[in-house]
Image (cartoon, rainbow, N blue to C red):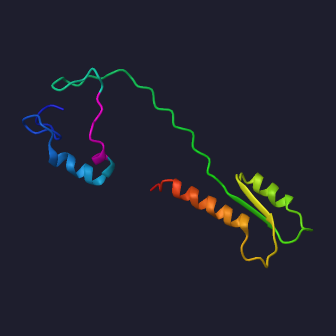
Amino acid sequence: MPAGSTCRTRGGKVAPKYHTPRFMLVPQLRAELEVKTPCDRGPGRAWERGPAVDAAVPEAATKPTRVGYARCSTAQQELQSQLDALADAGCDPVFSEKISTRIKVRPEFVKAMDFARTIKKAVPVSG
C-alpha cells in the first residue's frame, strides 16, 4: 500500500492503530509474525496482479471415531445382533462381553471408557 493509505503512515510505515484492532479481534493473527509474500514482490514496489492461483482443495473430513460396547447378561443370550448393529453404525473399536448385571466392575466397559477418554484428550477443541 502506498504511504498515506489507511494501513500506512504518511512516511510509509505500518500504522499500528489500523492493525491493532484486527489483532485483538482475531488472536491467531498475533501468532502469525511472518507474513508470507510472493517472491517477485518486495518493499517499495507497486502492487501488480499476479498469476491466478488455483483454489486449495479442501482436505477430506476425518471420520469421527465411534467406540462401541455390547454386553449380554447370560451365556444363553446372543451378542451378535448388538455387534452387527454397532458395525452398521460405524463403531470401531467395539468392546463386548458376556457378564452378569450383578457384577459391578465390567472390564470391557472400563476399557471402552478409557479408550474414549484417550481419544477425547487427543482431539483439539474446535470453537
Which residue is drawn at the image coordinates 27% and 47% (left, top)? 30
Seen at 53% across and 38% down, the residue is 59
Left or right position of 71 against 9: right
- Please, is residue 36 above or below residue 87 in the view? above
Is residue 108 shown above or below 40? below
In the displayed structure image, the side of residue 115 where residue 27 appears, left or right: left
Residue in the picture at 48% in, 53% down = 124
Farthest-out residue, bottom: 102
The residue most toward the left is 11
Q: Nearer the viewer, residue 91 or 27?
A: 91
Q: Is residue 20 above or below residue 107?
A: above
Span highlighted in magenta in the image = 29-37
Question: Residue 16, how many percent across, how many down?
Answer: 15, 46
Horizontal arrangement in the rendering, residue 104 relative to residue 78 (left or right): left
Which image quadrant: the N terminus?
top left
Camera-side residue of 93 and 17:
93
Tell me the quarter of the picture where residue 62 sits.
top right
Front one among 87 and 70: 70
Based on the displayed image, in which of its 4 quarters is residue 6 positioned? top left
Asked if 57 appears above or below 125 in the picture, the reply is above
Q: Is residue 18 left or right of residue 85?
A: left
